[in-house]
Image (cartoon, rainbow, N blue to C red):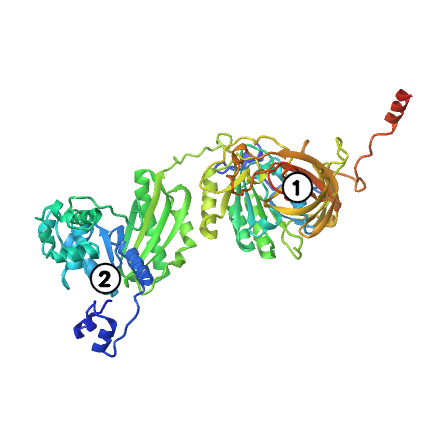
Amino acid sequence: MDFATLKTKGLVRTAMAPPAVRAEFPFGLGEPGLHEIAESAYGDRAAATGFLLAAIGQGVCGAWVWVRQASVVPDMGEVPEAALPGLSSRLRLTVQARTAQAGLWAAEEAVVSGAANLVIAEVEQSDFTSSRRLTLASMRHGVPVVLVLPYSCEGATAAASRWRLASRPSAPNRHDPHAPGHPRWRAVIERCRALPSATGQAFDLEWNDETLSLSVVSGLAAGPAAPPAAADENRFRLRAG
Amino acid sequence: MAANAPARAVGIEPGLRLTDAKATLPDLLSEEIDRAADLKALTALAAWMVRFSPLVALDGEDGLMMETTGCDHLFGGEAALVAGMSSRLVQAGHGHRIAMGGTPGAAHALARGAGPGEHPVLPSGREAEGLAHLPMATLRLSPEALTLLRRFGLTRIGQLYDIDRKALTRRFRSRQAGDAVCLRLDQALGRRAEPFAPLRPPPEHVECLPCPEPLTSSEGISDGLQQLTQRLCSALTVQGLGAQGFRFSAFRSDGAASAVTVNAARPVRTPSHILRLFREKVSRIDAGFGIDLLMLEASRTGPMASGSRPLSGDLAGTGFDAEAVSGLADRITARLGEGSVILTVRHARRPPDKAERPVAYAGQVPEAGAAPVLGPRPVRMLNRPEQVSVMAQVPDGPPLQFVWRRCLRRVVRADGPERIAPEWWTYLPPAPGERGRLPRTRDYYRIEDSDGRRYWVFREGLYGDDRGMDPEWFVQGLFA
């Protein structure tokens, strides 16, 4: 039995100590606890959402609760079902709140109810008290919570980690040099509660949606692949001649 | 014009002109009749009268019609019911005339024709003798019909009984006017049915809690709600039903009522869950000078899914707990308002911005099954595509640079086009002389700009497709 079915309500839960945060990527993202993912500049919200779905989204079935503040939708759009990983037994419940406080309340309610396996909240701002409540509720009930925040979020937080995401030019496309390839992002850990030494570390990530793998690439790789060499030209010249 | 009792004592009757009335009494106070405010007050009174019977309707501009079949035994008989209503209305300070009859027409006539202080109760079957002496004006006829009948000397309802119908209808100007008179007479005597449209449909289960003395404290209201919920849930359990809508009303002794409603996504009958939903809203009940009666109604009842839940997650059909999810949705809706909890369902439409629709969550389970795999889809999709001004190669090249939200973005890489044609049934050539918007083919491109951000843009229309002006470009979404 995997974690997801173990967490279904009604089943007797085995007492397990929460696994220790590993000293490597992704530093506890996806484990019970509160994490924040913020964009580094206006316009990087798509990169933050893509990173979220890539790092956590695969393999979490059951009910998701996506809380969003109504002001986010006309600005940055919404996440369609087509973009979510295609698991057949997944239900995504969207909660639309008018204020950030209402959204954070709904997120806490979803965690406490035990109905959700993953809670994502997209609000305009968050404060220390709400993040502390969410962290406590998340650890007590074993449900991971992620806050997706805009670029203007600063200040103290009780979250286990805070990431800053920026978009980077995509990987070279094997089949067509003029087409965008796999998406690439630059993720910086701004705050990490479990491993303070990892603060400030930056990762250049690439997401391959065919193999569903998030890999680290060298920061130097950029630009499209070079076109094939001039060997064909010689062949033509010989034939004409 | 209407006059109150002191004015009538001086000699000012309705029907007098205002100048004549002012001549009779120079200090007369007069106000214009405000029908809108009257209607509002009448509706509020109708909401209060629900404590006697759930079926209350408005009758004209200044009356209420109530259907009390089957309610009279709760108050000790019909006469006692009418007397009780009258005393409560006097307590609330409303001047009134009440009568009870076997048909709506009879009741209307008796109430309008009753003298002061009388509350006639006419047993059903005796309408003919009960109504004979009442004036014709109480029969709900139009003013022209009344004038005509008065010219014939017919002023009491009893005079109509023996007149030949055909001869009477021939005297009227039109066939409808004559038929209306006969219809009203037959409705009053019970020969023809009359539809009754209550203001609110009657609930399926009701529990009442009368208060021995007027209740003003909020703890008392919460205690009353708790007792009522226990009783209602046991009544529902006995019948094996659950309810989706609950309405808690408090009737005050001064003739006003206040109510709060909660809704549940699936039929429920657990008292703790229902009380939790009411907890947010019960503070909206206004106690005023004291509450006489608390009432809890259950509507939209339906059979409850039997409560057995599988112990192991493997045996459950879906990967999530449907009851816990709908309970969560109920609590969130109770606090944040209707329509806060949304489910996105797939819609079989081809344009990507219409392919998914938000639907309010109502306890349904989304159908499993993967969507047909089309091209790559963006991770954020705008609800309405935003127009951009684009420099691109004509006729079907990808954009080279574009301006979106007032920033110029240079395109470094582009992929596409993915052609999505409109559905054939949306293409309707406009009628001659009309100008309509024809649906146009869309070519979607996945582009990346020099900052590394990726967009999904489309060109609406093809050059030379004769379906409108030159094609325009829009941004549909953002890729990760």
Query: Does A109 sit above or below residue B306?
Result: below
Along the viewing direction, whichever of B106 and A125 lies nearer the viewer:
B106
Q: Can residue A113 be seen in this view?
A: no
Residue B129 showing in the rendered view? yes
What residue occupies the far bottom of the structure in this picture? B26
Q: What's the chain of the residue with tag 1?
A: B
Q: Pointer 2: what residue?
A: B89
Between B198 and B387, the one nearer to me in the picture = B387
Residues at marks 1 and 2 on the same chain: yes
Residue pictured at 20% horizontal, 56% vertical: B144
Q: Residue furthest front?
A: B433
Point out residue A64 in the picture as x, y percentages from the top left corner: 55, 41
Numbered disc 2: secondary structure: helix
Q: Is residue B186 above or below residue B351?
A: below
- Residue at 25 percent across and 47 percent down: it is B196
State the quadrant of the C terminus of chain A.
Answer: top right
Q: In this view, does B272 lie to the left or right of B176?
A: right
Per the image, label 1 sits on a secondary structure element best described as strand
Neighbours of disc 1 within 10 Å: few (<14), some (14-19), many (20+): many
Displayed quadrant of residue B291: bottom left
Classify the position of the N terminus of chain A by image quarter: top right
Q: Residue B457 carries which label?
A: 1
Query: What is the chain letter for disc 2?
Result: B
* Up-down relation of residue B25 to residue B169 (above or below): below
The residues bearing labels 1 and 2 have C-alpha atoms spaced at a distance of 68 Å
